[in-house]
Structure formats: C-alpha cells, structure tokens
Amino acid sequence: MNEMFLLKLGEVVLKGLNRGAFENRLKSNLARRLRPYGSFNVYIAQSTVYVEPNDDGCDVDGAWDACHTVFGLASICRCRPCEKNTDAILAAAVAYLGDDLSQAASFKVESKRADKRFPLTSIQLSQEIGGRLHEAFPHVAVDVHHPAYTVYVEVREHAAYVHGPAEPGAGGLPTGMGGRAACLLSGGIDSPVAGYMIAKRGVELECVHFFSYPYTSERAREKVLELARLMTRWCGRMTVDVVGFTKIQEAIRDQCPEEYFTIIMRRFMMRIAERIAREHGCKALITGENLGQVASQTMEAMAVTGAVVGLPVFQPLIGMDKEEIVAIARRIGTLETSILPYEDCCTVFTPRHPKTKPVLAEVEAIEAAMDVEGLIADALANTEKVTVRYHDGAR
Ligand code: ATP
Ligand code: MG
C-alpha cells in the first residue's frame, strides 16, 4: 500500500460530549461515498480521518474526488505512509514527492510529531529531512520563509506520512447531524446554492418544485431534476416533490388583482412546501431569496410571504451579492445548468407592476375569496415524488 488520504476534521473538533456521534456520522458518510471506488479502510484518530485503499483494485483518483464533497472536513491530502525512521521518511519523500519537488524553485520541510516517543523533535526532523533532500535535489534551494513547495512530514501513532500541500475540504458539518429541511428548488441560480449552504451545516435535504404545465415545459422540469442530481454530490440522495401548480396559477390569474399575482403565488408555494416538509420530517424551509433582488424580495414582501408558515424559513443568500452567489454556483457545479434558458412558473403571469410593499390584511382579504384549502389539496394530490440518487456529475 503506497498511497492513502489524511482528512483533517473541521468544526467537528469543537464539539464536546457529542463529538463521537459527529465522528461516527462522518465516518459512515465517507464509507458510503467511497464504496463505488473499491474497498477502503476508514478510521479516525487524533482529529484525522485515515482512508487506506485495501487493495490494488481501488480507484484512488475517484475516491479522492469524492472526498472533496464530503461535509465535515477542513482539509484533505494524499500521502504516502512509511516506517517511523528518518531513512524511511527520506525514501518516501524522494519517491512520492520527487517529481513535484525537483520542479520547484525552493522548498522547506515542515514536520509534526504527534507521537512524542519519536526521538527527534519536529524541528530536528525537518532539518534532517530538509538537509538530505537538498543533497538529493541540489538544484532546489532551501527557503524556510517563502518556499515554493513544502514537504510535510507527520509522525503519528502507527506510521509516518509524507505529503505535499493539502487541499481545502468541503467544510461544514457531517450530513445528517443537523436534521432535515425542505428546499424550494426553482430552475434558477439561487435556490440550488441556498440548498447547498444549508446542507453544508449537516442538514439533509428534500426538494419541492412547482411546475405549471403547459405554461412551463417538460424540459424545464427536467432541468430542475438535473439540478437536484448535481446537488446530490454534496447533499446525498434526495426526493424531489414535483407539485402540479397550474390550477393555482390559473386561479390566481382569474381571481386576484394583477399586482398581487407574485406574492399570492409565493404564499401558496410556502403553504404547500410546509405541508410536504412536515410529511418528510423536515424542520425548516429553505429559499433562495435575496434582499432587494426583485419585487417579491423586499422586507415587506417577505413578511407577507413568510406569514403563512409556522416552520422557520432559512434564506442563506439574503445578504449576498449576485456575484458571490454565482461564484458558489460555479464552484459547486450547478451554474451551467441553472443558466439554461427554460422558463420557471414564476415567469408565467408576471405582473407588470408587482406590489413591492404589499399589506398583509389586503392580501388576506383577496385570498379569503379563494378556495385556498381546495387548491392546496388538489396540488398535493397532483404531486409526483422523484427520487434523485447520488451521481458523480462533472467535476
Ligand atoms: P432562483 O434563482 O432560485 O429561481 P430567484 O432569484 O429567481 O431565485 P424568485 O423567482 O423570486 O427568485 O424565487 C424566490 C425563491 O422561491 C427561489 O429561490 C426558490 O427558493 C423559490 N421558488 C421560486 N420558484 C420556484 C419553483 N417553481 N419551485 C420551487 N421553488 C421556487
Ligand atoms: Mg427564479
């Protein structure tokens, strides 16, 4: 076995009594995510997850990719284990990092001695390995202040490990430790990012999508399911409840003043999403709302929209700029699909002059003339549940 991963725990280390539960969850999430890539031994010690391929049949590159999207990890690195003596450490560094090292302008060695029985201190070990590496690669200068490349040596309980610079992990908390929430998923840029951000806090997701056939096309529905599929790389498998919303939109068009179309439509969405959420054991709703972005996202409009639900509504994008949201969408891999030009039910029957400061009493008076319960029951009866499994979309 000549290559394995060291994954450093993130915020999990701040947990007190329930730290064990967080670690166990992280371990089982990792084991599940690595299963498609072969047999791996996964164990946690000293705030680090060790991932060792059990045989040569493992797809180590595939497993490495998967590690980037597992929540709960601060940083991740590939490394070579070796015996705990300086000759073995030097040989491992030369064989494993020699290519990278010989191309660098300068280098240093940084050591960590977690096993205090090891005879050299960290500084002595760095000096010893650094000196001997410099003999092996005399054209690469030693620079302890601003090295172009750093060789890391970690002396731990069972072995020593050498590696190059670590990469950032996915951060957050292990999926499943924070309960479940329902994400209102449109086909836009914002809602997949909103779902991702709450999922990162250890929350399992269910998605709810409102679909107004024939005003919105089958392809728009497929686009949303593809977005959900892309999100599973981070969030794990989920169910998307695709709610038939046509009758409600037609009722709103026929019975409400035009300037209130959007706000009343959003209130129907929230009511239905809440019922679906409760049915799935979700304890909150998630939306991609963003203060001031559109007329329905003023404080007044959000107060009127939020007034129909009892569950907390999480709006993780509320204070972000579009540019920041787009950068996250690009990084998590949903942007390209989000910008495909299919219509959303929000764009059907859009008022020319939406109310930016709706008054709750006026909205309630308009809705009092509608068969709100009947429409909701009809939409719920017209809901298709689609299970979206983990899929390793383009990275
Ligand atoms: P997005 O980019 O997520 O579509 P948006 O900026 O276009 O957001 P709106 O269209 O006002 O904003 O929608 C606000 C939020 O309402 C969305 O982020 C999403 O959470 C929810 N939403 C809107 N349309 C739908 C839909 N058809 N199905 C499910 N949720 C929706
Ligand atoms: Mg939208």
Image (tube, rainbow, N blue to C red):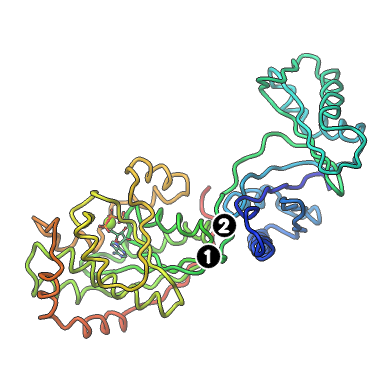
Where does label 1 land, which residue?
178
Q: Residue at x 74, y 22 (%)?
A: 102
Q: Residue at x 42, y 80 (%)?
A: 279
Q: Earlier in the sequence, mark 2 or mark 1?
A: 2
Quadrant of ligand 2 in image: bottom left
Marks 2 & 1, CB-CB < 8 Å contact: yes
Task: Judge by depth and name the residue closer to the eye, 59 or 29.
Answer: 29
Q: Which mark is residue 154?
A: none
* Up/down of 377 relative to 42, above or below: below
In the shown orientation, is residue 15 left or right of residue 94? left
Amino acid at circle 1: Gly
Task: Give the farthest residue toward the left.
Answer: 257
Identify the element where label 2 is drawn.
Answer: loop
In the shown orientation, is residue 95 left or right of residue 207? right
Tell me the distance, in whole angstroms, between the alpha carbons under discs 2 and 1.
Answer: 8 Å
Amino acid at circle 2: Leu
Identify the element where label 1 is drawn.
Answer: loop
* Image position, residue 345 (x, y; %): 24, 64
In the shown orientation, is residue 349 left or right of residue 36? left
* Image position, residue 236 (x, y; %): 54, 63
Q: Which mark is residue 173?
A: 2
